[in-house]
C-alpha cells in the first residue's frame, strides 16, 4: 500500500512479523532453548534495509543485543525503544512457526514481544525525512530469565534520557508495574527409615507451619497495602520439592516464593519481618532457613505528569484518537533495569498479556502497525516540544 509520513506499511509489517515469529528464540536458560541468535541476525538485516546501521552488543557467548541509533535533531533527547527477543518455551498452538488466521499472526513470541520489535523497526522507517528526537533501538536478550541484555545496555554509555519498553499493553501507556522478588525457604530435618519415622525429623511436615504462616498472616498483611494503579502486592508459593524416596523420612523440603512488590515498599524491612516470624516457628528437630533472593527487579512508577507519558498520551491521541489515562500492569519487564539506572520509562506495545506465554499466542497485525505510528509520533513530539 502507499504510505504517508505517518502511515505504516501494513504489508511490510505483516511480512516482517511472520518472519520474526517464525524464528525460534526460546531463552536458553528455559528448558534448553535455542537462544536469540537467529532472530538477532534477522533484526540486524532489517535495520540494514531501513538504512539504520546495526551494531552487535555481546552479552554472553553466542548471545547478544542488536542496537542501532537514528540521530535526531541537535539538542533533542535520546529515547530508547527497547524490546526483548527471547521467548518462553513452546506449547500448544504457540509453536516456533507463524500462522496467519484472519487479521492475526499466531505463534510463540507474537505479542511477547516480537510484535513490539516489528513496531519499533517500522517506526524507524516512518521517521525518515521527519524531525525527531534521537532514537536508540535495542533488541535485547534474556528478559524472560535474568534481564542480562538490558543490564548490558544500560552499562554502556548511550546517553539515554528516556525509555519505551515494548510489552503487550493493548496500545495503552503503562506507567507502573510491580517489582519481583524470588527466593526459597527450606526446612531441614533428619532422615530415617520409613518403617521407623520416630527416629527422624520429617522436613516435609516441618514445612506445614511455614505454609500456614504465609497463608494466614503474611499474605493477609500484604493485602492492606495498595497502589492506585496496581492494587496490592502479592506472595505465591509456586514450587515445592522434598524427599528422596517413599521409604525414606525426608530430611529436606524447599518451597519457591514469587513475591510481587509495589512501588514504595521496603523489601529489606519486609524480609526482616518475615525472618522474625519464621524464627518464632518451633518444630522439633527442624531448622527453617530463608535463602537470600536469587532474583530481584524493581517496580516501575513513572509520574503521570512526566513529559514522557504526557508525550505518549498526545501521540496516542493524534494517531489512535484515544484520550484515556495511563495504566498499571501486573507483570514485570526490562523497565525495572532502566528505572534503577535513573531513566524515566514507560511500557507500551501491541497485544495483550492475556495471550503472552499461552498455548495460542497471537497479535493483531493492525495493532502492530498502529503501534509503529504511535512510536514515530512520540519521537517527533519529543523533538518538537509539543509535549511540554
Image (cartoon, grey):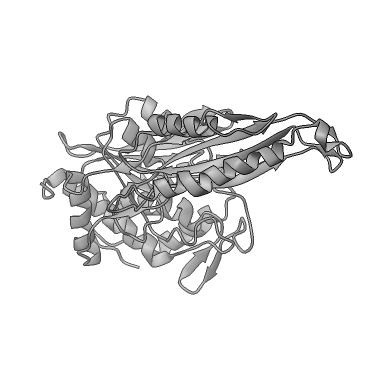
Please state which of residues 284 and 241 is positioned toward the viewer in this rendering.
Answer: 284
* Residue 22 image point, x, y percent: 57, 55
Please state which of residues 269 and 8 is positioned toward the viewer in this rendering.
Answer: 269
Residue farthest toward the right in the current orientation of the protein: 195
Q: Which residue is pictured at 49% across the width and 45% down the height?
A: 85
Q: Which residue is pictured at 70% across the width and 40% down the height?
A: 204
Count of numbered labels shown in the rendering: 0
The quadrant of the image that shows the N terminus is bottom left
Please state which of residues 300 and 143 is positioned toward the viewer in this rendering.
Answer: 300
Q: Which residue is pictured at 16% across the width and 44% down the height?
A: 383
* Residue 48 image point, x, y percent: 41, 43
* Residue 146 image point, x, y percent: 51, 35
Please state which of residues 109 and 122 is positioned toward the viewer in this rendering.
Answer: 109
Q: In the picture, residue 172 is in which quadrant?
A: bottom left
Q: In the picture, residue 155 is in which quadrant?
A: top left
Q: Is residue 36 left or right of residue 310?
A: right
Q: Is residue 37 left or right of residue 354?
A: right
* Residue 189 image point, x, y percent: 72, 30
Residue farthest toward the bottom in the current orientation of the protein: 102
Residue 298 visible here: yes
Residue 129 visible here: no
Q: Which residue is pictured at 22% across the width and 49% down the height?
A: 309
Amino acid at each position: 500500500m502507499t504510505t504517508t509520513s505517518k502511515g505504516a506499511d501494513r504489508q511490510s509489517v505483516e511480512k516482517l512479523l511472520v518472519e520474526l515469529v517464525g524464528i525460534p528464540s526460546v531463552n536458553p536458560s528455559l528448558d534448553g532453548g535455542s537462544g536469540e541468535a537467529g532472530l538477532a541476525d534477522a533484526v540486524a538485516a532489517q535495520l540494514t534495509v531501513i538504512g539504520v546501521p546495526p551494531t552487535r552488543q555481546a552479552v554472553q557467548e553466542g548471545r547478544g543485543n542488536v542496537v542501532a541509533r537514528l540521530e535526531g535533531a541537535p539538542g533533542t533527547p535520546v529515547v530508547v525503544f527497547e524490546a526483548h527477543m527471547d521467548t518462553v518455551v513452546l506449547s500448544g498452538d504457540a509453536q516456533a512457526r507463524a500462522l496467519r488466521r484472519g487479521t492475526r499472526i499466531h505463534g510463540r513470541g507474537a505479542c511477547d514481544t516480537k510484535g513490539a520489535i516489528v513496531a519499533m523497526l517500522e517506526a524507524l522507517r516512518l521517521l525518515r525525512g521527519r524531525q525527531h528526537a534521537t532514537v536508540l533501538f535495542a533488541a535485547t536478550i534474556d528478559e524472560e530469565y535474568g534481564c542480562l541484555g538490558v543490564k548490558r545496555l544500560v552499562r554502556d554509555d548511550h546517553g539515554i534520557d528516556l525509555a519505551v519498553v515494548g510489552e503487550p499493553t493493548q496500545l495503552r501507556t503503562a506507567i507502573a508495574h510491580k517489582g519481583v522478588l524470588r527466593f526459597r525457604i527450606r526446612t531441614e530435618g533428619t532422615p530415617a527409615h520409613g518403617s521407623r519415622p520416630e527416629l527422624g525429623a520429617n522436613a516435609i511436615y516441618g514445612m506445614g507451619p511455614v505454609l500456614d504462616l504465609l497463608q494466614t498472616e503474611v499474605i493477609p498483611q500484604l493485602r492492606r497495602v495498595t497502589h492506585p494503579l496496581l492494587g496490592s502486592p502479592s506472595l505465591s508459593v509456586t514450587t515445592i520439592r522434598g524427599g528422596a524416596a517413599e521409604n525414606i523420612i525426608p530430611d529436606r523440603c524447599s518451597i519457591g516464593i514469587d513475591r510481587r512488590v509495589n512501588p514504595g515498599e521496603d523489601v529489606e524491612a519486609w524480609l526482616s519481618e518475615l525472618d522474625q516470624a519464621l524464627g518464632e516457628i518451633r518444630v522439633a528437630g527442624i531448622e527453617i532457613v530463608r535463602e537470600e533472593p536469587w532474583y530481584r527487579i524493581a517496580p516501575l512508577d513513572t509520574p503521570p505528569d512526566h513529559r514522557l507519558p504526557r508525550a505518549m498520551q498526545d501521540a496516542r491521541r493524534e494517531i489512535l484518537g484515544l484520550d484515556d489515562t495511563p495504566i498499571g500492569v501486573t507483570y514485570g519487564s526490562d523497565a525495572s533495569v532502566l528505572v534503577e539506572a535513573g531513566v524515566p520509562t514507560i511500557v507500551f506495545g501491541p497485544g495483550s498479556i492475556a495471550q503472552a506465554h499461552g498455548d495460542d499466542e497471537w497479535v493483531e497485525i493492525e495493532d502492530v502497525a498502529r503501534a509503529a505510528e504511535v512510536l514515530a509520533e512520540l519521537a517527533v513530539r519529543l523533538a518538537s516540544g509539543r509535549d511540554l
